Image (tube, rainbow, N blue to C red):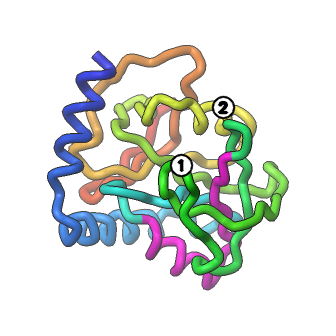
Amino acid sequence: MKHSLRQTILEKRNALAKQEIHHRSKKIQEHLFELEEYKKSRVVMFYVSFDNEVFTHDMMRESLKHKTVVVPKVVHKEIEPSLIISFDQMIPDNKYGILEPIDVTRVTLKSINMVLVPGLVFDSHGHRLGYGFGFYDKFLMKIPHAVKVGLAFDFQHVDEIPKEVHDVPVDVIVTDKEVIRIKK
């Protein structure tokens, strides 16, 4: 079931034109920036979007004006949160072509107030299907204090997906149509 759901959503997402991705991502940015949790957060960890994911580059550039921005760098199959001062200090990694900081400038995990989490599918319980590598679930277990926010296009939100014991749910899902707060 996970595989077919991933495929279906990936096909829908890949069918979006770049203009549509930017338009929908702008709406997601507006909803995100209106969240009280975002306004109160001093240190926000963004994922760096690639392909047809929710476009985070503009969100990061805007946030750099008034927040401390952290991005993931994968080191030995683990996410290392790294501080960035400028969006321009990142280069594509060799494996996937995703922008990463050239060097890791570590931050303490407890300093991160909010983590924006990528995913292919999110459900109404905050569970997510990613790309199947498990990097984010392992990382999210290390920062239970941070608000976890999934960014998704509206069709990436479904009622329920199969969950596993190691899955770490998000607290909020922000789509281009709505903000979904997960009831605990």
Q: Quadrant of residue 160?
A: top left
User: Which comes before the other along the chain, label 1 or label 2?
Assistant: 1
Quadrant where the N terminus lies?
Answer: top left
Q: Residues within 10 Å of mark 2 (few under 14, many from 20)?
A: some
Foreground of the two, 2 or 25: 2
Q: Is residue 26 visible?
A: yes
Q: Compared with residue 81, is residue 135 higher up or lower down, i.e. above or below?
A: above
Q: Position of residue 77 (x, y in %)?
A: 67, 36
Q: Compared with residue 119, is residue 169 higher up or lower down, i.e. above or below?
A: above
Q: Residue at x 38, y 53 (%)?
A: 174
Q: Amino acid at mark 2?
A: Lys
Q: Amino acid at mark 1?
A: Lys
**Residue under circle 1?**
95
Q: Residue at x 60, y 36 (%)?
A: 135
Q: Residue at x 46, y 71 (%)?
A: 57
Residue 10 placement, left or right of 173 = left
Residue 38 placement, left or right of 141 = left
Foreground of the two, 124 or 96: 96
* In magenta stretch: residue 67: yes
Q: Which mark is residue 138?
A: 2
* In magenta stretch: residue 66: yes
Q: Do the residues under discs 1 and 2 have CB atoms within 8 angstroms?
A: no
Q: Compared with residue 14, is residue 71 higher up or lower down, i.e. above or below?
A: below
Q: Position of residue 72 (x, y in %)?
A: 64, 54
Query: From mark 1 to mark 2, how far is it between C-alphas?
Result: 20 Å
Q: Position of residue 40 (x, y in %)?
A: 64, 66
Give the extent of the magenta segment: 56-74
Q: Residue furthest bottom?
A: 65
